[in-house]
Image: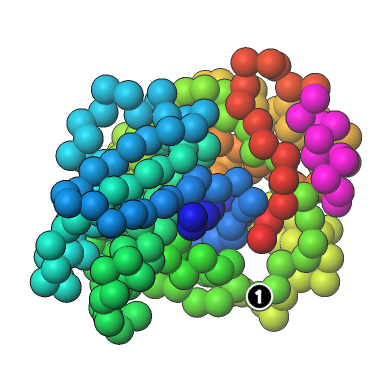
């Protein structure tokens, strides 16, 4: 069993636009204790079973489009092995939510199948393969806090993050990433220099507040409820920082303690999905 961890974009600045329509980013990525799970077993052909609390959200999707199966086929093709494995995905991370769930699943699948199929592939080649699956797959393959640039695939280790608890909140609306990027308007950000690190949560929060998430206004224009989520988090006791992750609609609050995050969670509308946990 391999965890496929949800990522959060602690900040996300859009700093440029490529000729192919992809956007150039500057983003601090961290991972959380919220995770899907990938299990792989030998089999005569390639199959994928999806279980868990988030499985229903994928019902009706074209199975061939699932990034897990795409990752398996791509890896098999590149390594010259037959794509034979029974894959089981336990889905917990909300879908199309700005938490990189699909990318995390694909990255965990690559690692699991490299082991199962005993493939000797240099890390650099595996990262190239990950990038061809999606801009966020390499960061999930790395699985460490990182400053992501390029379209998200160029990774540098992040300064050490102070200990803190995180509350993730999703109001139950899906926001497809391309639509949010298309709806973005306004100037590009300059991208601020990154210091040596943050002494504590207050210092991190002050830095995050200067940078923000440049996709927030676009997400709110498509799903106004995102503004309500941000407001509710902002007014919670003990809140250090509030922002949206990725292209939304999941927002997060940072707190000094897990108790504060859990207390804030208990005051949210019951219809909203939430997870109080830690950065890992
Ligand atoms: O690479 P991925 O398939 O995850 O990207 C989905 C879509 O999100 C892209 O087709 C593009 O519209 C948008 N995107 C972008 N700039 C990025 C990452 C994604 O415009 N850096």
Q: Does residue 52 show up?
A: yes
Query: How far across and how far down the image is residue 3, in percent?
Result: 52, 55
Give me the residue at 82% from left, 71% from top.
Answer: 199
Identify the main secondary structure in magenta: helix
Highlighted magenta segment, given as a residue range: 256-266
Give me the residue at 87% from left, 41% from top.
Answer: 259
Horizontal arrangement in the rendering, residue 70 relative to residue 173 (left or right): left
Query: How far across and how far down the image is residue 136, in percent?
Result: 38, 57
- Where's the C terminus, which quadrant? bottom right
Q: Nearer the viewer, residue 145 or 190?
A: 145
Give me the residue at 21% from left, 40% from top.
Answer: 65
Q: Is residue 170 above or below residue 246?
A: above
Count neighbours of disc 1 (C-alpha within 10 A) and say few if under 14, some if 14 to 19, many if 20 or more: some
Q: Nearer the viewer, residue 185 or 223?
A: 223
Give me the residue at 28% from left, 56% from top.
Answer: 42
- Residue 226 picture quarter: top right
Q: Nearer the viewer, residue 122 or 49?
A: 49
Query: How far across and how far down the image is residue 156, in percent?
Result: 50, 77
Q: Nearer the viewer, residue 16 or 4?
A: 4
Query: How far across and how far down the image is residue 113, in percent?
Result: 31, 63
Ligand 1: does it lie within 8 Å of the C-beta at label 1?
no
Q: Determine which residue is flagged by label 1.
A: 159
Taking the magenta stretch, the answer to whether it contains residue 263 is yes
Element type at mark 1: loop
Q: Is residue 94 above or below residue 13?
A: above
Q: Does residue 214 show up?
A: no
Horizontal arrangement in the rendering, residue 124 relative to residue 236 (left or right): left
Task: Tally the marks.
Answer: 1
């Amino acid at each position: 069993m391999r965890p496929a961890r949800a990522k959060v974009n602690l900040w996300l600045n859009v700093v440029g636009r490529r000729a192919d329509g992809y956007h150039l980013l500057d983003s601090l990525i961290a991972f959380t204790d919220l995770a899907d799970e990938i299990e792989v077993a030998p089999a005569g052909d390639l199959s994928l079973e999806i279980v868990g609390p988030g499985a229903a959200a994928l019902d009706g999707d074209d199975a061939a489009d699932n990034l897990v199966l795409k990752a398996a086929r791509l890896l098999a093709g590149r390594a010259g092995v037959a794509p034979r494995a029974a894959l089981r995905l336990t889905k917990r991370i909300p879908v199309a939510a700005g938490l990189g769930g699909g990318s995390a699943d694909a990255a965990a699948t690559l690692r699991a199948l490299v082991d199962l199929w005993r493939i000797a592939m240099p890390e650099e080649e595996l990262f190239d393969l990950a990038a061809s699956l999606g801009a966020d797959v390499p960061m999930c393959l790395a699985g460490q806090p990182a400053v992501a640039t390029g379209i998200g695939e160029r990774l540098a280790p992040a300064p050490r993050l102070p200990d803190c608890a995180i509350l993730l909140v999703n109001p139950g609306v899906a926001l497809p990433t391309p639509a949010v990027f298309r709806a973005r308007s306004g100037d590009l950000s300059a991208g601020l220099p990154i210091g040596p690190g943050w002494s504590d949560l207050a210092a991190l929060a002050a830095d995050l507040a200067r940078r923000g998430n440049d996709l927030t206004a676009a997400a709110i224009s498509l799903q106004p409820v995102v503004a309500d989520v941000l407001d509710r988090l902002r007014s919670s006791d003990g809140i250090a920082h509030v922002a949206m992750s990725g292209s939304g609609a999941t927002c997060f609050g940072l707190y000094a303690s897990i108790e504060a995050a859990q207390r804030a969670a208990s005051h949210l509308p019951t219809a909203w999905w939430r997870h109080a946990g830690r950065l890992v």
